[in-house]
Amino acid sequence: MPGTDASAPPSSEARTALAAGISCYLIWGFAPLAFQQMGAIGADPLEVMAHRTLWGVLWAGLLVLLAHQSGQVRAILTDRRTMGWLALSTALIGINWTVFVMAVNSGRMLEASLGYYLNPLLSMAAGAWLFSERIDRWGGAAIALAAVGVVLQAVALGQPPWISLILAFSFAAYGVIRKRISADAQSGLFVECLLLAPLGLAWVVMLQLNGAGHFTDSGSSVFWLMVAGPLTVLPLALFSWAARRMPLSTMGFLQFMAPSIAFVIGLVQGEDFSWLRGISFGFIWIGALVYAAGALKRTRAARVLAPEPGLIDPPAERR
């Protein structure tokens, strides 16, 4: 990570970490296009979810082996308390993944993007409530602006933005649980996929036996459904590596890339975007900028107090 001298050129590792961080958010941002391709071949969200867990466990297992973390996985599997928490986090991430695929494949990309704009703000509120973390005036202003944006979105839609709220709350709760346990990102994700994989395998087998599955329809069907695995695992691995090697403020800015890309995709694909929805997103974007500015200010203050570089704890992994 770069030192405290702002004039010093960034180190090779810092540049690599930035590239990894940008790459993971680019993958998350454009992933909806891949899920839409899976929908185009006929796979519904549950079938996509089944393949996501089925192929995800193979990719996650491969990364665990490459990172020599099999000992960590064994420790997790033999710890009843950790497994109990991971069972709950598995249910939450399963809901999050399924609702996300349902949203992007039903022309509701804008609502999905709103959910992930809200997520860091909701996580900050959860940290204050559950872990007694202090919310400064920047954080309070960001949360207030986001709340106004959600209310306006509800008025524009004629109902609460349920998809956005489910995505934001499920992932914030997921992050809270992962913060409470000692499992790291890769080994924890492998165990979560391991818990989901039997259900995914059973669902795929049932669909195929009943002639309702799409995996063997064509070469493109095989390709797109298998892509669900690396789409789930690889960006998380990039994120986990990058987050420990770059300033938290930088990650704070980068995390808004993915919902911004999804937002643009939704607009390009012709989703309804009224002036009131535009105003609601304006409040969300201002809240996001305030949040990022607050993170930058806190990081600069921390560098003054502790100039030596060190590792940071990464926030909870995404999608």
Image (tube, rainbow, N blue to C red):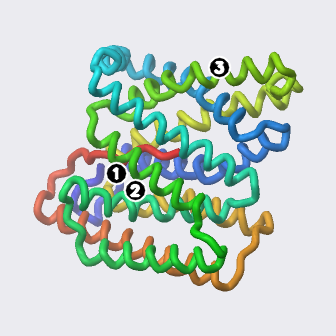
Q: Is residue 62 left or right of residue 130?
A: right
Q: Is residue 17 left or right of residue 50?
A: left
Q: Amino acid at mark 3?
A: Leu
Who is closer to the viewer here, 233 or 1? Answer: 233
Q: Amino acid at mark 1?
A: Met
Task: Residue 292: give x, y in percent of width and height.
Answer: 38, 69
* Residue 254 appears in the figure: no
Q: Which residue is mark 2?
A: 251
| Residue 13: quadrant of the picture | top left
Q: Is residue 229 above or below residue 16?
A: above
Task: Residue 125: give x, y in percent of width and height.
Answer: 32, 63
| Chain-order first, disc 1 or disc 2 | 1
Q: Is residue 6 above or below residue 215?
A: below
| Chain-order first, disc 1 or disc 3 | 3
On residue 246, which mark appears?
A: 1
Which label sits in the foreground, 1 or 2?
2
- Judging from the image, what secondary structure is the residue with disc 3 in? helix
**Residue found 73% across the figure and 31% down from its top:** 225
Who is closer to the viewer here, 176 or 287? Answer: 176
The local crowd at label 2, few if under 14, some if 14 to 19, many if 20 or more residues have their Cα within 10 Å, is many
Q: Which residue is mark 3?
A: 201
* Mark 1 → mark 2, Cα distance in angstroms: 7 Å
Task: Residue 165: give x, y in percent of width and height.
Answer: 52, 60
On residue 314, which mark appears?
A: none
Q: Is residue 79 above or below residue 303?
A: above
Q: Are marks 1 and 2 in contact (CB under 8 Å)?
A: yes
Q: Are marks 3 and 2 in contact (CB under 8 Å)?
A: no
- Judging from the image, what secondary structure is the residue with disc 1 in? loop
**Residue found 71% across the figure and 76% down from its top:** 273
The local crowd at label 3, few if under 14, some if 14 to 19, many if 20 or more residues have their Cα within 10 Å, is some
